[in-house]
Every structure is written in C-alpha cells, then in structure tokens.
C-alpha cells in the first residue's frame, strides 16, 4: 500500500497566566521566520495559512523591532494560528520521497485570565469549554513559567510556583465533567506537557537544569498533583509526560526604549518540539506496550510519514515487505492501521525503534547524506533532531529519558 502525499499536521498548545508572554512568543516565532537571515539559509518556508492573522503577528513583531512596542494582550480570547512549513522549490534536484507535501503547525493558546478569574456568565463559560476542547488534539502542551514572576519572588519562588500549578490544576478539574462525555477518559489529549521558562533572558544564570531543580525543589508536590489531575482525563495514563521535559524561552531582550528581537532563546526549538519530540516519544511508548490499541492508533497517526522519510519507504511497503506478513495484503488497513500493524508487529519493531532513537552522530551523518542526495525532507527532519540535541547541549532544553 502506498502512503499518499498529505499534509502532516501537528498541534501545540500554550498555557500561561496573563502577561506571561504568550502573544510575544508566537509573534516573535513567526516574525523570525520571515527575516532574510532565516529565509536565505533555510530549506523551507514558513507561511501563515490565514494571511490576515499572519500579518497581525508580523505587525506585532515589527512594533517590537522598530518602535519597542510590545503587543497588546488578548484578554479572555484565544486565536489559533496555523503555519505551513513547505520545502523550497528546488526544481529537478529535489529527490525527496512524496510522503507528505507540508508540515502544518497549529498553535493554540489558552487565555490565562480563565484560570486566574471566574467567568462572567454562561456565554463566557461555554467559550472557555469550547476553547479548551480545541486544544485537545494538541501533541505538545507548553506550560509557561513567567521569569519575571520568579524574579519578583526571588528566594520565595515556591509562592509563585505553587499558585501557578495549583490554579491550573483547579481550572482543569473545573472543566472535567464538561470535557469527558459519559465520564469516559479521552483518547485524544495532549500527552507531553513541557514546563517552559518564559522571559529567560531575565534569569541568565538559570540554565535548564537549574530551572528543573527550582521547580522540583520548590513545588514538587504541586507538580505531582497536576500530573494526577491530568491522568484523570486520559486513557492509557502511562503514556503521559507532565513536568518531565523543560525548556527555556526568551522571545526577545527587553531594554529601556528598545526590544532586541534578534536576541532570542529557544524559539528555533518550537518546530522540532512540535514535530520530532512527539514522534520519538510516541514510538517509544508504543514499543514499551504502555498504550492500548486505540491510543496507539491515535498517537501514531502522523508518525508513518516521518519514520518512512527517515528509514525508507521500503521498510513499510512493497510486495515482499513486512506488510504482507503482518496484515495480509494490507488493502483495508489504511495508513493509520498500517502503521500500527508495523509498529506493533515484531518484524519491523527494531527498524521503527531505531528511527525513534536517532541522535548525535547518527543524525549528523544522516543529515549530511540527505543533503548530498538532495533528499530535503529527510534533511529537514534530521535537522530538527539535531536542533533538539543542540538545545540540550546549550542548556536550553531537557528531555525526558522515559
């Protein structure tokens, strides 16, 4: 069975109190992708699917860059942004397999006002529920820890951290009955919850290891309570990582009468975190038999194209390939069913696991080979993996080893 070219869609949800930097983060992420220093050297272009929304984000970016004017906060409103990542037209030299035509990143944010204040009435209460439901398809959730508030509570950081985690847990449990139909746990739900330090430039001495130690040292019980609350929402709660991954973000460096948008920390990790991290984690969880079949199908829906682009379509299809031995002729399975059969089947488990464990020298070698062969999809994907490795070496990112 041939995997048809399609758009591979990944969702990322951003949670944070009002003023924690959500709007600045998405504006600087998109604005940086439009700058010549990025577009000239990148193998891909990033465009906003909605031109109007994209222009508003870019206007925010230009306001910071040229006038030191931060964007206005969006109170009690959530706007999803969809970005398409497409390979540049390389003409006849491009030799990438047509497994997917583009990577689509959908960015959601959840207004911090809705976990700091009560809603004003039934209409807003329903909008809050609808907004949260729109986030349920996300692969990765970022929970922002405001660097300014850590600074304001220096020496007593637990006061802020306990409030942040506790209020979020309470807000989640308030919505539980409205999100779970017939009290059934959800198959589709963000499985990777990353604690993200925003405004990291204010705390240059706080690398990602010290950030992790600060959170766990000051608010471990509250983090455990949040994890337990999230487990109540999902089927196969063993396939859930809450507070196991940490990252530092700084959208720009804010100075009196000046905002340096070129001095960023961690924003180049957003795409790799959305695309590469779930791919690795989901394959690992399925391989460890931590999920049921329904959850496995959901987790691995998009991983087929990524894995095939990395280790070759021959591992997945072909008249003499593992498809025949695993699912007969494979005519009824479809891409999702095919992938689950392949991952759960012993014949190619090793190949899939190898793809999910790529790192270090292996990634660099594969990236160089992909560039030499003009296989630009594999080159972009391996670059994403290398970016995450680099983020760990630089003390910006810390990934779970589970």
Image (cartoon, rainbow, N blue to C red):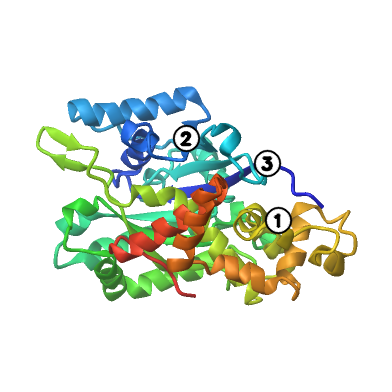
Please tell me which of labels 2 and 3 falls first in the chain. 3
In this rendered view, identify the residue nearer to me: 21 or 372.
372
Left or right position of 109 against 356:
left
Nearer to me, 46 or 244: 46
Label 1 close to label 3 by CB (< 8 Å): no
Vertical placement of residue 47 versus 352, above or below? above
Structural crowding at the residue carrying mark 1, measured as other residues with C-alpha within 10 Å and reported as few (<14), some (14–19) or many (≥20)? some
Q: Which residue is mark 3?
A: 6
Q: Position of residue 128 (x, y in %)?
A: 50, 43
Q: Which mark is residue 45?
A: 2
Q: Are marks 2 and 3 in contact (CB under 8 Å)?
A: no
Mark-to-mark CA distance, 2 and 3 = 17 Å
Please name which of the two marks, 1 or 3, marks the residue nearer to the observer: 1
Question: Residue at image x 54%, y 59%?
Answer: 278
For label 2, the SS is strand
The answer to whether residue 224 is left or right of residue 9 is: left
Cα gap from disc 1 to disc 2, whole angstroms: 25 Å
Measuring 42% from the left and 54% from the top, which residue is drawn there?
A: 142
The one of 102 and 120 positioned closer to us in this rendering: 102
Near mark 2 (Cα within 10 A), the count class, few <14, some 14-19 or many ≥20, is some
Where's residue 275, x and y in %?
52, 52
Mark 1 = which residue?
313
Is 8 left or right of 37, judged from the image as shown?
Answer: right
The kind of secondary structure element at disc 1 is: helix
Q: Nearer the viewer, residue 368 or 175?
A: 368
Q: Secondary structure at mark 3?
A: loop
Determine the CA span between mark 1 and mark 3. Answer: 15 Å
**Residue at image x 38%, y 39%?**
41
- Quadrant assignment, res 320: bottom right
Which of the two discs, 1 and 3, labels the residue nearer the N terminus? 3
**Dot 3, crowdedness within 10 Å: few (<14), some or many (≥20)?**
few
Q: Position of residue 125 (x, y in %)?
A: 51, 42
């Amino acid at each position: 069975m041939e995997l048809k070219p399609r758009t591979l869609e990944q969702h990322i949800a951003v949670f944070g109190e009002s003023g924690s930097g959500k709007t600045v983060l998405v504006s600087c992420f998109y604005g940086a992708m439009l700058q010549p220093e990025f577009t000239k050297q990148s193998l891909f272009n990033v465009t906003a699917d909605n031109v109007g929304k994209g222009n508003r984000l870019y206007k925010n970016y230009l306001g910071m860059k040229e006038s030191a004017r931060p964007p206005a906060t969006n109170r009690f409103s959530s706007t999803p942004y969809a970005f398409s990542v497409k390979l540049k037209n390389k003409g006849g030299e491009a030799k990438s397999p047509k497994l997917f035509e583009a990577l689509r990143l959908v960015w959601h944010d959840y207004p911090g006002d809705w976990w700091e204040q009560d809603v004003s009435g039934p209409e807003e209460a329903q909008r809050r529920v609808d907004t949260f439901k729109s986030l349920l398809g996300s692969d990765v959730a970022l929970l922002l820890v405001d660097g300014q508030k850590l600074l304001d509570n220096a020496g007593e950081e637990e006061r802020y951290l306990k409030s942040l985690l506790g209020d979020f847990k309470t807000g989640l449990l308030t919505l539980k009955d409205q999100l779970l139909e017939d009290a059934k746990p959800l198959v589709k739900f963000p499985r990777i919850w990353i604690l993200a330090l925003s405004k990291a430039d204010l705390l240059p001495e706080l690398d990602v290891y010290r950030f992790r130690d600060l959170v766990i040292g000051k608010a471990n019980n509250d983090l455990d309570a949040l994890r337990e609350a999230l487990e109540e929402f999902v089927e196969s709660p063993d396939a859930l990582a809450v507070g196991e991954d940490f990252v530092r973000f700084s959208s720009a460096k804010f100075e009196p009468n000046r905002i340096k948008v070129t001095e960023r920390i961690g924003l180049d990790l957003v795409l790799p975190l959305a695309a590469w991290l779930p791919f690795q984690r989901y394959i690992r969880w399925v391989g460890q038999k931590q999920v049921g079949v329904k959850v496995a199908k959901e987790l691995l829906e998009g991983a087929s194209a990524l894995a095939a682009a990395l280790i070759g379509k021959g591992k997945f299809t072909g008249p003499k390939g593992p498809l025949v031995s695993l699912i007969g002729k494979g005519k009824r399975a479809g891409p999702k069913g095919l992938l689950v059969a392949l991952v759960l089947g012993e014949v190619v488990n090793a190949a899939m696991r190898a793809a999910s464990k790529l790192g270090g020298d292996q990634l660099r070698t594969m990236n160089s080979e992909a560039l030499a062969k003009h296989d630009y999809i594999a080159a972009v994907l391996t670059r994403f993996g290398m970016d995450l490795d680099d983020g760990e070496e630089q003390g910006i990112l810390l990934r779970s080893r589970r």
